[in-house]
Image (cartoon, grey):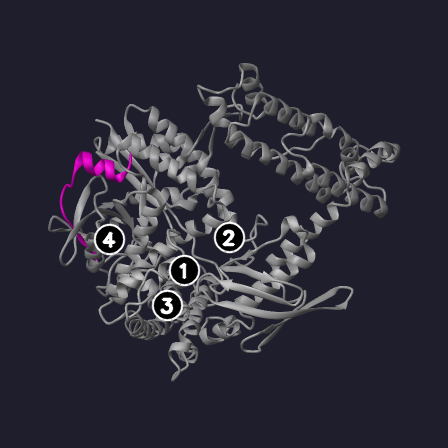
Amino acid sequence: MKTSIIVHGHFYQPPREDPYTGIVPFQETPDNCINWNEQIYRTCYLPNAYSRYLDFTGKVSSITNNYSYISSNFGPTLLKWMDEAHPEFLPKLKEADRISMKQTGHSNFLAQCYNHTILPLENIRTKNTEVKWAIEDYCYRFGHRPEGFWCAECAIDKETVDVLADNGILFVVLSPWQASAIDGKPLNGKSAPCDRAFYIEGFRNKIVAFFYDPELASGISFGHLLRDADGLFEKLRQMRTKRHNPALIHWATDGEIYGHHESFGDMALAALIRKLRESDEFEITNYGAFLEKHGVSGTAELYLGVDGRGSSWSCSHGVGRWHRNCGCHTGGPDTWNQKWRGPMRTAFNHLEEKTREIFDREIRSMLGSSINPDTVIEGFGKVLSGRFSVDSYVKSFKSAEGMNLTDEQATNLAILLDAMKNCMFSYTSCGWFFNDISGIEPAQCIRYGICCANRLQPFAPRENLLVSLMKDLSEAHSNISSVGTGEDIAKHLVRSVPGSAEASGFFILNRILANPSMYRNTYGIFKLVDINDTQVTVRDNLTLEEIVYTYEEDLISNDTLSINLRNRINGFTYSFTNKEITKLTKIDITKWTNENLSILYTDSVVNKVSLNIEKYMFLFESDIGASIDNMSEENASFCAKLVASYVRRRTTDSLAKEFNVVWPIVNYVKNAGKMSDYRTIKNAFDRLINLYAKLAEGPGFTQKAASNMLQILSRARKEQVYPDITSIQNSIYPVIEGAESSLDEETVYNLRRDLNFVY
């Protein structure tokens, strides 16, 4: 009998957006990405959807969607970010879901606790909402219900078992240290068996648990087993022999190990998948399929931690890491403590109590005493998943009098729902995981708490919710004296400029500095309703509020442009200069100005420069970057922008010979310019190749298009410009492997050869 192999990846990043704008702020990353989500997308999430298997010469033998063969869960908040930032990625997950369902009859994907809160520390109402939101998000994305569930940090207690069972969940994946006994026999500190499935019991119900292999999980996460797929495969063979052909070998790790924490980990995973699929000893499968085939082998008693509140995979004390100074932490000097954890959780507990009180009161007042406030917030999951808009959801309710909600009532309901969401998001587990309250993760949780308090304030005229929150946070002391307390952190995070004003300033700058082809009508959660020379109206798509600002431009000096805004309702004024503009907006402005300036670089200008540029080549040696003076560097920078502008104007209908005009200029830049000029040109050709990649995904990738693309690529390489071919490799692989490809054999051969596939 073959041994079943299950590889589980927990793919998750904490939510990072500003709750007032819905935009993830700029974050420094090692690879110059605009935020950590982008960094990890490029190094892990995307590569695993198109993972290369190389032959001994380094050519691509095959491309695998790893998600089609491994078990995994994705954080709903991460997928929500991907909806906006990389909508092309979600179809790869759906493709993987279809393949796994076809191959095994069960999906590879598990649902995940919605915003990664520690369920054992939550009250029953929040537990139910988190699970229902997670299931709704899963159903909307995959079109069927989940069988399995990933609890944040694998944290679980008996009440969580009941909630999962009540919501139709069949199984969870846990650490082998989260069981205290098997079939009534104490484990006495030993790990639970990981070769079969067990029932775990709540107070009323039971579900199935799979306890992952600790040796493999640790070796892959920290022992660099992914550096050698052959070695990992051989280890599995040895384990199989040593364990006398077990029914199951499986492990669970953070999914980011497959490419982000371990470079090229996705390729090691693809190689392992290939070896497992070709093996006579193993079959790669998922938990649902294994459960159907082998059933349940006994009952495991849950370990509930030193204080009886539950257990997890990353806190040896249970779940202390998320509510007290238990000693578990990551990073920081040995002299630091985590005494701040308790006061921070207490602060949010008090905020939640007040939020529930206000929410319940206002919902019943607005919708009637017969309405259950829990069903209102649980149904909000349909908005979070994208199935409904906020507007359509709130207007699906009737008032207490049985009438349609007025616009004011609809707005109030939307505000209350967003407040409750932010209250729940303040418990995102990452805020307690690390070493000090000064980190970006605790700050993000505090942001959600501040937003919740501000949203609710109009419904609590007799008390100041933000002041109460800050008073509680003042008891949470940082290990860094200059940071102070949670209150000090919160004061820095209180916005001086409303999100609506920031969005309005963005739209005004966009209309001033961009050409019409680059006009933007959305800014995070805000939509532009109307704009003219003196007034701008924006709509908050979360709270349904429309805000009107009058404005005026003020050119203070040659290098300072000020935008002065005034709220038409409350009269508050806000001013933006280049010092207040966000880093992301400055990046956008650079794109707009480059696009505007590129209009000056007409094809006729490029032709004139190309005809004359070779006259100056005798001044230079052949090495890139060997400029003779600053003037040459300035000219080279201009020429690089000239080439980039010309290439950006080309489409997939452009002929290869059209690019002949730029090669003399490229040669000049190679000799006179800097590496940054070279990158300017390369980025332009990257964009062009990406256009061909999109074309290859549809019927428009004809032999003529393929031939033209290859000619452009060949000449670019000859001129020492090496465009990134990753995207075209991803898109062309199904074409050149497809039995019904419309391309002739010679074209397929040329594509394989020039795109570095085995041929």
Q: Give whichever of discs 1 and 3 has the lower sequence position.
A: 1
* Amino acid marked by disc 1: Asp
The structure residue drawn at horizontal position 54% and vertical position 64%, both measured from the top left corner, is: 538
Q: Which residue is mark 1?
A: 391
Q: Which mark is residue 413?
A: 3
The percent coordinates of residue 281 (x first, y second) are 28, 26
Q: Which residue is mark 4?
A: 178
Which is more toward the observer, 659 or 433? 659
Distance between mark 4 and mark 3 Cα atoms: 41 Å
The structure residue drawn at horizontal position 23% and vertical position 66%, both measured from the top left corner, is: 307
* Amino acid marked by disc 3: Leu
Q: Give whichever of discs 4 and 3 has the lower sequence position.
A: 4
Distance between mark 2 and mark 3 Cα atoms: 33 Å
Secondary structure under tag 4 reads helix
The residue sitting at the bottom extreme is 462
Q: Give whichever of discs 4 and 1 has the lower sequence position.
A: 4
* Amino acid marked by disc 4: Gln
Mark 1 closeness class: few <14, some 14–19, many ≥20 residues within 10 Å? some
Give the magenta range: 285-303
Is-magenta flag for residue 299?
A: yes
Tell us which disc is closer to us: 4 or 3: 3
